[in-house]
Every structure is written in structure tokens, then in C-alpha cells.
Amino acid sequence: MEFWFTEDQSANLRIGCRILETIHSEVTPFQKLAVINTAQFGRMLVLDNVIMTTIKDEFVYHEMITHVALNTHAKPKKVLIIGGGDGGAVREVVKHAGVENVVLVEIDGRVIEVSKKYLPEISCALEYPKVRVIIDDGIKHVQDHKNTYDVIIIDSTDPIGPAVGLFSAEFYQAVFESLTEDGLFVAQTESPFYNNSLISRIQSDVSGIYPITRLYLANIPTYPGGLWSFTVGSKKYDPLKADTSKFPDLQTRYYSPSVHEACFVLPPFVKELVR
Ligand code: SPD
């Protein structure tokens, strides 16, 4: 017998992964949550039938959503991660020795507990002394913490259900107010193939609030289209002007100083989205 997990990656496209076993499955107060073992990507975290991360390709996403922003800021000390309950972004942030405090605000505590149990390679830094985990609404958290964080990382699910507000202009304004005077944020902003109008709208919203707005790309095999976008909104530091020769020597498998430069080179069809 063969068992397959399928995700509708667009209205007209499905990705299928052969399942070796279902490790965990539950319905939390917020969503359906599962960890499955797949033949191609190993253990996979799935929320509401959408692939969040897998043991085999998670490094691309988690390195790219963290190091670009952290290396752009001259001295990031206080870092906030919104979402990201699997802990992958936290694991990358703590590689930066200068970071003093990492606050993770995740709305669904079950994502954290299940990731700790079944995805230890990803969640391994959640218990570090400099990491504080808060189970709360990220929107409320930024509204309640003005002028607090040097870098804010928005590691959200797709813009449906509880995450819709994390893609709004009001939220980007609240993030602006939660950042220190030279702070910057980065958010995962979906697929240039399937979410092109969303990306254009975000670019327009963010550039109406932040002096510097940049889009960059990474290749993530399990996300729709494989090509994935991230948006930076910055008050002072431009990721394109960062001195890559001074970057810390990080243990990474996808991100590097050269990739930092290269990821901002956009194919013409993506450039059109950010005009
Ligand atoms: N289409 C899935 C996009 C999910 C992005 N966030 C994943 C969270 C991993 N830490």
C-alpha cells in the first residue's frame, strides 16, 4: 500500500509526497497540525494541510529569513520572531554572537511543543538562555512593544486564516513603531509565480512606510513554485550596501556573503512586481 500527502499549492496545482508514516496529528485551537515522515524530505511539519518545513530543505528558508536581515543591521541586539514556532529561525538567530535577546511570539503553543518533540534538529535552540518564548498574538505584541527591537522577523504561515493580519499595511506600520530608530524587519512574502499581486501590494505598502524596501529570493523545493520571496523594510540600513567582507563566519549551508549579494538580483518578471 502507498500513502500520499497532497498540498493544493494553487487552485490548479498539487504537490504529492509519499508518506512513510504519520508521526503525529491533532487539531489545536488554531489549526490542524501534523508531523509526517516523507520518503523524499524526511519529517515534515504540516499546518492546515500546507507544508511548513521539512528536515531536508528547512535550512534554506531558516537561513535566508534570518541572516540577510541580521547581517544588514550594524549591531542587532534585540530580535523578535513572530510565528516560527518550529524554532528554525531561532536556531539561526542565536548563531549571531552579538544578539543578546531573542523573543519568539507564536500564537499556537502546540506548534512549539510538537516541534520540540518530533523536530529536535530544528527546534534545538528554543531552550537557550537568551531565548524567550511567548505564546501570544504577534500583532498585539508589536502594538504593546514600541521602540524595542533592532530586527523583527516575520516567519508566518500563508496569508489565510490567522496569518492574514501579518500581511497588512497596518501591521507593517505597527512593526515600524516596534523597531528601534535604525531597525529593520524581514517577512516571508510567498511565491512570485502564484502570489504576484500580493508581492506587489506588500512592496507598495512597505515602501509607503519604510525609507528602504527590498525583495530577495531563495529556492525552497517544498514551497509552491520552488522560488520564494522575502521582503525587507528598513529605517536606515540597506541590505544591498552591507559590507559582506565584514560578515561573521557562520556555519550555514545555503546562505553566504556571496548569496547575500546574489539573492537581491531579481529576474525581470519579479522586478516588475516591485516597481
Ligand atoms: N507555503 C508555506 C509557507 C510557510 C512559511 N513559513 C514556514 C514556517 C517555517 N518556520
Image (spheres, rainbow, N blue to C red):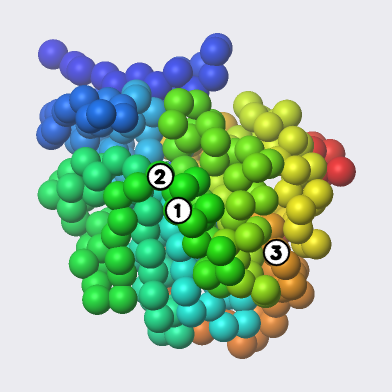
- Does 156 sit left or right of 88 as displayed? right
Q: Which of the 4 image quarters holds residue 205?
A: top right
Quadrant containing the N terminus in the rendered view: top left
Residue at numbered disc 3? 234
Identify the amino acid type marked 3.
Ser
- The answer to which quarter of the image holds residue 104 is bottom left
Q: Secondary structure at mark 1?
A: helix
In the rendered structure, which disc, 1 or 3, sits on the residue that comes first in sequence?
1
Label 2–label 1 contact, CB within 8 A: yes
In the displayed structure, 128 sits above or below 269; it is: below
The residue at 18%/44% (across/down) is: 114
Name the residue located 68 percent from the left edge and 41 percent from the top edge: 169
Find residue 137 and name its label: 2
Kind of residue indicated by mark 2:
Asp
Between circles 1 and 3, the one closer to the viewer is 1
User: Can residue 231 be seen by looking at this rendering?
Assistant: no
Q: CA distance from mark 1 to mark 3?
A: 19 Å
Amino acid under disc 1:
His
40 left or right, relative to 137: left
Please give the residue where the numbered disc 1 appears in the rendered image: 141
